[in-house]
Amino acid sequence: MSTLHKDGQVQDTGDFAQTIGVDHQAVVGVMKSLEAAEMIICEAIDHFKWVLTPEAKEYLGKGSPEAQVRLPLHSDSRGIDSMKRRSNVNMLCM
């Protein structure tokens, strides 16, 4: 409350929680309680963070599954016939 009284607002509860060394969810809980008691007004801020999954990291390094299949076909002079024999799979190619 002293920060609210002194500064008039808390810009970002995540930054505020980190500054005072408190769990962010605890700060959000207090803010929600104060908002429910109509002591403060809160405005939600969306923070999006994009993170690659382990699968995406693999694709980044090796290429997409399609590229992983296509690259050996182009580098192997025997092409699709060779791949069919190695994989023991019948493919329909048009």
Image (cartoon, grey):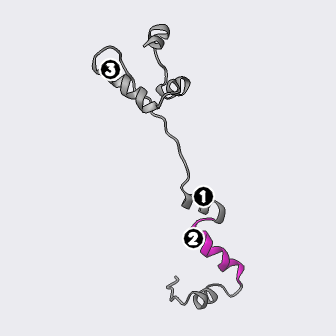
Query: Residue drawn at (53%, 27%), measured in percent from left and top?
Result: 21
Numbered disc 1: secondary structure = helix
Single out the mark in the foreground, 3 or 1.
Answer: 3
Q: Is residue 79 magenta?
A: no
Where 82 sits versus 52, above or below? below
How packed is label 3: few (under 14 Cα within 10 Å), some, or many (20 or more)? few
Q: Quadrant of residue 26?
A: top left
Task: Give the residue pinned by disc 2.
Answer: 66
Q: Residue furthest front?
A: 21
Instruction: State the separation of the CA atoms marked 3 and 2.
Output: 52 Å
Q: Amino acid at mark 3?
A: Glu
Where is residue 74? Give x, y as percent: 68, 78
Numbered disc 3: secondary structure = helix
Is residue 74 or residue 86 the one in the foreground?
A: 86
How packed is label 1: few (under 14 Cα within 10 Å), some, or many (20 or more)? few
Magenta: predominant secondary structure element?
A: helix
Task: Give the residue pinned by disc 1.
Answer: 57
Task: Give the residue pinned by disc 3.
Answer: 35
N-terminal of the pair, mark 3 or mark 2, is 3
Where is residue 82? Give x, y as percent: 64, 89
Mark sitting on residue 46 = none
Quarter of the image with the N terminus in it: top left
N-terminal of the pair, mark 1 or mark 2, is 1
Query: Residue drawn at (58%, 65%), measured in percent from left and top?
Result: 64
Q: Amino acid at mark 2?
A: Glu
Q: Is residue 72 magenta?
A: yes
Highlighted range, magenta: 63-76
